[in-house]
Amino acid sequence: MAGALAGVALALQGCAPAGYNQDDDQVSVANEAAAAAAEATPTPAPDASEEAAEDTGDAPKKDVPITTKLTAKTLPRMGQVVVDQDGWVLYRFDKDTANPPASNCEGKCEQVWPPAYTEDGKPELSGVDESKVGVITRADGTKQLTIGNWAVYRYIGDKKPGQWKGQAVGGTWFVVTPAGQRNVTCLPTGTPKAVEPPSDDAAAGGDDKESGGDSGGYSY
């Protein structure tokens, strides 16, 4: 048995991937003078979107990128993964919950791990069982896809579709399988750190850190 375990450990060590975004008041005759003054400085009409938000009680809609497709795919060394419509590998987070399904990645965390946002919870599916796909409402009112009751995310540390540099980051992030399980087929040596959240300068077009520094004040 000890020899078998040692063999597994050696196999996993070689698995590290390369390169480790809410009646006008009636005026009586006695108040004609006040009405005239009011007409001289009319009150601006309320913004249509604000009026709609007041009527429905909903906050203005947050502009987020929508995940329109989930595809099961087999990648070399990693095996079964799920990718979005652009080929980006999706992940799950051990600090989330599946019963009930909920996300615990907010603020700077969601800048590094963008949620797989949805409008109706019904993306196009290829190789992913419809019964495994669900939706949760995040704290900010946006909706996020789940697979096997686990919220799913992208990772900004992946620089091109098909990469999985987020595998085992912080010991809590793992590539998700089409059934919503953690894919631990291929694990890096050690515990990788997440890349830094985009800085304000980066958002304005400046430089941003790649990885390996301070955690940026957020928890994995």
Image (cartoon, grey):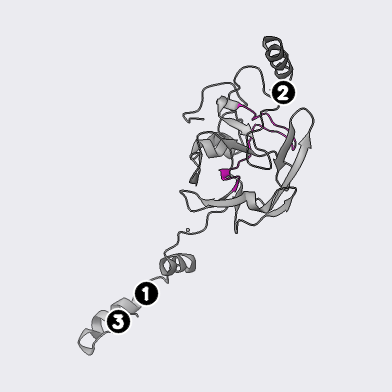
At a point 67% along the width and 55% down the height, the residue shown is 123
* Amino acid type for the residue under numbered disc 1: Pro
Q: Amino acid at mark 2?
A: Gly
Q: Contact, CB < 8 Å: mark 2 with mark 1?
A: no
Most foreground residue, 134 or 17: 134
- Direction front: furthest residue: 1
Q: Earlier in the sequence, mark 2 or mark 1?
A: 2
Q: Which residue is identified by label 3? A: 36
What's the magenta region?
146-168
Pointer 1 residue: 42
* Helix, strand or loop at mark 1: loop
Q: Secondary structure at mark 2?
A: loop
**Extreme residue in the bottom direction:** 29
Work out whether mark 1 precedes mark 3 in sequence or the reverse, and give the earlier one. 3
**Label 2 sits on residue:** 19
| Residue 87 image position (x, y, % from top left) | 74, 42
